[in-house]
Image (spheres, coloured by chain):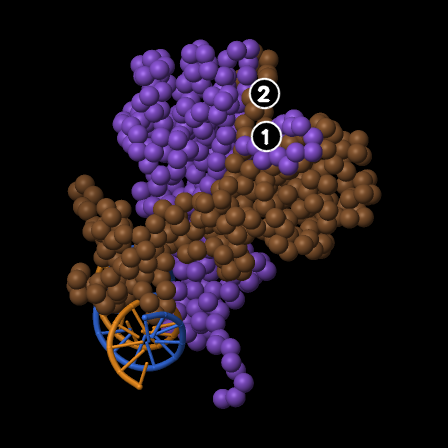
Chain colours: A brown, B purple, C blue, D orange
Amino acid sequence: MPGDIKRPEPLYKQLAAALAEAIAAGEYAPGELLPSETQLMSRYDVSRPTARSAVAELRNMGLVTSQHGKGTLVRGAETTTPRSTVARGINRAGKALQLTDSLIVVEAGTVTRTHLEGMVGELLERPDEAAFTCDRLLADPETGDRTAHRLYIPFDVAEKVPALAETPDAEPADIYNRLVEAGHALMWTEYPSARNPVPDERAALNVPDGAPILVSHRVTLTDNGHPLVCEELRTSAAHTRLAFRITPEKVPARRKARSV
Amino acid sequence: MPGDIKRPEPLYKQLAAALAEAIAAGEYAPGELLPSETQLMSRYDVSRPTARSAVAELRNMGLVTSQHGKGTLVRGAETTTPRSTVARGINRAGKALQLTDSLIVVEAGTVTRTHLEGMVGELLERPDEAAFTCDRLLADPETGDRTAHRLYIPFDVAEKVPALAETPDAEPADIYNRLVEAGHALMWTEYPSARNPVPDERAALNVPDGAPILVSHRVTLTDNGHPLVCEELRTSAAHTRLAFRITPEKVPARRKARSV
DNA sequence: TATCATTTGTTCGTATGTATC
DNA sequence: CGATACATACGAACAAATGAT
């Protein structure tokens, strides 16, 4: 075999790349309509399915959104870049702990029971054990962007801290304060991640085409590293970003450190 | 037909939902092959395009990956859940600052000049101004998962701190230490976000089908809040997650706090 | 090594439904 | 109401990758 003859890119990918370039160059301004599928067919001499595939590529790149009966709109930076920021910090005012985010509760907490599967089970070091969960729907008061919130309280933690078992639907800051009142010294680690939404989430969180969702887990630990509870947060990455304040920690010099 | 006001879901979405449910129920185990398109056609009595659309849905939900000539594989939690964790903390050993992540440099830093567009320009409060950039390719030494890293140094910062202008390709920790030597008291805020990859990124970062990329910006500020430099990090959300240690900050009591 | 069946990828064609203007 | 646009669905053919014969 001679050295790797170039196989041409598929037609629809070429077309998608050409259109993406044109959008980046500003030939199609944000808010404007992309040429219709019929126009693309004649302009680039391709079939209907090919034109559709190309536009579909642009959609799950998040560059455009299609509207049935109207056309395909170019999305500007305003709709691609997050507008609202959720500050994932914790403040200590006297003895009381407060959260630094400014989200408001849209749907009150509903408590259910589940088993700790997957990542949450791993983070709480209690795979498949039983736990209370409390679900809330939050929103940014300025933009209205929605965020799903879930708190996991393992059964054995609820048993040892009765204040949690009584009202597992208390707000996270209250949960933290009750853990402190129960004599725990707390610390926190948060793990942001992302994935593409399932159809339910796309509707509930108002996720636009081609946008993933940010998923973040905040684990509350005792000062000797045992996990107690876990908060899970899900929000459209197109609308919201997170913010973490990073505080340097003192370590003995000359040690190759790997904390967190 | 009386009644029946509701228009039924599209066939391919019904099929996708049915298959997704079957996967969740364990009827198709991770690593196994999904029924071929031909089999789906006869089993569910649909056409080839419909079967293909259903499988395409599963792909960009991240549930399966298709291999040309072989079949469509079910992805287990091992390939859906991040394996490696990048600790985004900072340690202070004596006077020197160290980063807590354990990534190694695969491709050394290449320095270029750009203008601060979009989110980075906003975070550095210098929209459209000129800046050095230094690009690196990092990897997790255990899993080999890749991460793209870019450091932005605005021209005016490089002018005031000549040590940066001399070697803008120094490692981030060194950059921080030089800013400290120049008399700055530093603090940091990091903004994790996510989006779907462009084809280049999908190849360079080895992003699997249906997985978004995590994008995180760490801004270095002076103690009075002026931004100096910015790190940008891009990695496959299917392979890697971030970790932040959250340290409570003291605030005056009774104040509705909104720091970060 | 070469061939073949299987499977997914690409591309065309065509028809109909439905939302928007 | 009609024209236009995207969404869904069918059929058909060939290309390219894979694995086994």
| Label annotation for residue A249 | 2
Q: Secondary structure at mark 1?
A: strand
Q: Position of residue A130 (x, y in %)?
A: 73, 49
Mark 1 crowd level (few <14, some 14–19, many ≥20, 10 Å Cα)? many
Can you tell which quarter of the image residue A185 is in? top right
Tell me the quarter of the image containing the C terminus of chain B.
top right
Q: Are marks 1 and 2 in contact (CB under 8 Å)?
A: yes
- Give the residue at mark 1: B245
| Label annotation for residue B253 | none
Residue B83 shown left or right of residue B51 in the figure: right
Tell me which chain the residue with mark 1 is part of. B
Residue B174 shown left or right of residue A124 in the figure: left
Q: Is residue D14 above or below residue B101?
A: below
Task: Name the residue located 43 percent from the left edge and 26 percent from the top edge.
Answer: B227
Residue type highlighted by circle 1: Arg
In this orientation, does residue B30 appear?
Answer: no
Task: Name the residue located 73 percent from the left edge and 50 percent from the top edge.
Answer: A169
